[in-house]
Image (spheres, helix red, strand yellow):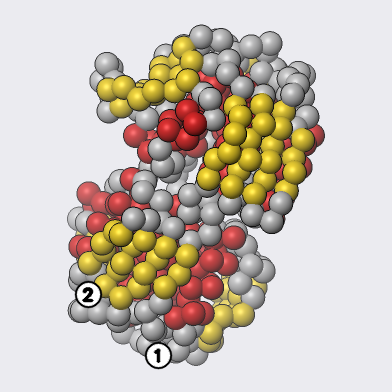
Amino acid sequence: MDRLVVTGGTRLHGSVRISGAKNSALKLMAASLLAEGETVIENVPHIADCLTMAEVLDRLGAGASWEGSSLRIDASGALEVETPYELVSQMRASIVVLGPLLARQGRARVAMPGGCNIGSRKIDLHLKGFERMGARFSYDHGFLNATAPSLRGAMISLDFPSVGATENILMAAVGATGTTVIENAAREPEIQDLAAMLVQMGAKIDGAGSTTMEIHGVDGFTAVRHRVIPDRIEAGTFAIAVCATGGSVTIEEGRAEHLDLVLDKLGEAGATVEAKDRSVRVEMSERPRQIDLVTLPFPGFPTDLQPQMMALLAAARGTSIVTENVFESRFMFVDELNRMGADIRTEGHHAVIRGVDRLSAAPVRALDIRAGAAMVIAALAADGTTDIADIHHVDRGYEDLEGRLTSLGAEVRREPSPWPAER
Ligand code: UD1
């Protein structure tokens, strides 16, 4: 278990290139199972979650091999249908193989997921959608068995615009008989990326990126080459880091249109933001000002940037209020920020953050991917040297975070952890 050792107080300067979007790459990798051929996905980040998904594909019989940042996935042979617990427990997003397996094989056996420590994350919406398409489920020994000898199109109205349910149902619907309509669909850019690759493969999809998607099932898919969109959450993380430390950074491949509200909020906090075609420059020359924000599905403020914003606001001028509407337990990392001198109180899904003059370094833990990124931001802005343990959580979502922060002038190094991992 590694830790990061971060000495705060340095302003960030220079430019940083954003990797391919983790949350897009994982679903594109699952979609490759639909085509009997060799898919090439470019711009896949070398992070633990993508390595886990490559292993899931391998176990299913779709050999995955890396060439730099491109991933070749050969799903031309017969596929297995079982995804084991040791992989699903590392990354709950592995359940997105359910949709493509049902479409191609008519059955799947997937271990029930564990995953990020941010609340009980159910998959009921995924399963209700598949059921409407004719799938049946049974459970044994921690596994979910799904069968759908003939998957057929259906009207599916989601109770909540779940990203994973929209994607999983979409990947089943493209190969079902007839037309599927998904109402209250999620609209995240990653869903549009997935739909773009599926259309290139031969799928017929209308309305990707809107709340109603209409999918006309087709027979058979062609393997294609597709480039993953840049990671908006990684871009947002760097933008927030600059606001916390002060300085000026150009975020190459940052897409302003994917970060509208985030950049507006950083502007409200005092940053100067300049959006170009394929980059965003963020400059901060004052102490951040308080802001209020509410997380919501896209195009609302992303829940995956809420912890990083809390780290920024912890040392802002004034009192901020943050409301978390997407995940029920996404404030657990607040105790770690308070150990660094932050003054944050939570009540249900609201947090009241009284900005302190300066955070102070302390030994802390990364509790999940984004909470870990928040601790790194807090440490960059704090007085002294912070030890952040359990950094493997951050490695699930960020490629070489310490290298890239160092190139911007930060003092960050990785060391083996002297503490036992939390049980
Ligand atoms: C995806 C992202 C994650 C991001 C989240 C919201 C990936 C790999 N992960 O997660 O980083 O934080 O979108 O933008 O892409 N829910 C149910 N039943 C379901 C499905 C979801 O109740 O069947 C609830 C969840 O518990 C949660 C909310 O809906 O409270 C949102 O979940 P969802 O949009 O599905 O997130 P994920 O796809 O898991």
**On screen, residue 103 above or below 343:** below
- In the image shown, does 271 or 265 lie closer to the viewer? 271
**On screen, residue 338 above or below 14:** above
**Residue 399: percent from left, percent from top:** 41, 42
**Residue 97: percent from left, percent from top:** 35, 66
Residue 258 in the figure: left or right of residue 392 = right
Q: Is residue 11 visible?
A: yes
Whether disc 1's CB lies below 8 Å from ligand 1 is answered no
Q: Residues within 10 Å of mark 1 (few under 14, many from 20)?
A: few
**Residue 376: percent from left, percent from top:** 50, 26
- In the image shown, does 10 or 60 lie closer to the viewer? 10
Q: CA distance from mark 2 to mark 1?
A: 17 Å
Secondary structure state at the residue bearing disc 1:
loop
Q: Give the labeled residue for mark 2.
A: 79
Residue in the picture at 40% in, 77% down: 224
Q: Give the labeled residue for mark 1.
A: 219
Residue in the picture at 47% in, 85% down: 202
- In the image shown, does 163 or 308 lie closer to the viewer? 308
Residue in the picture at 49% in, 90% down: 178
**Residue 251: percent from left, percent from top:** 60, 43
Amino acid type at image mark 1: Asp
**On screen, residue 76 above or below 191:** below
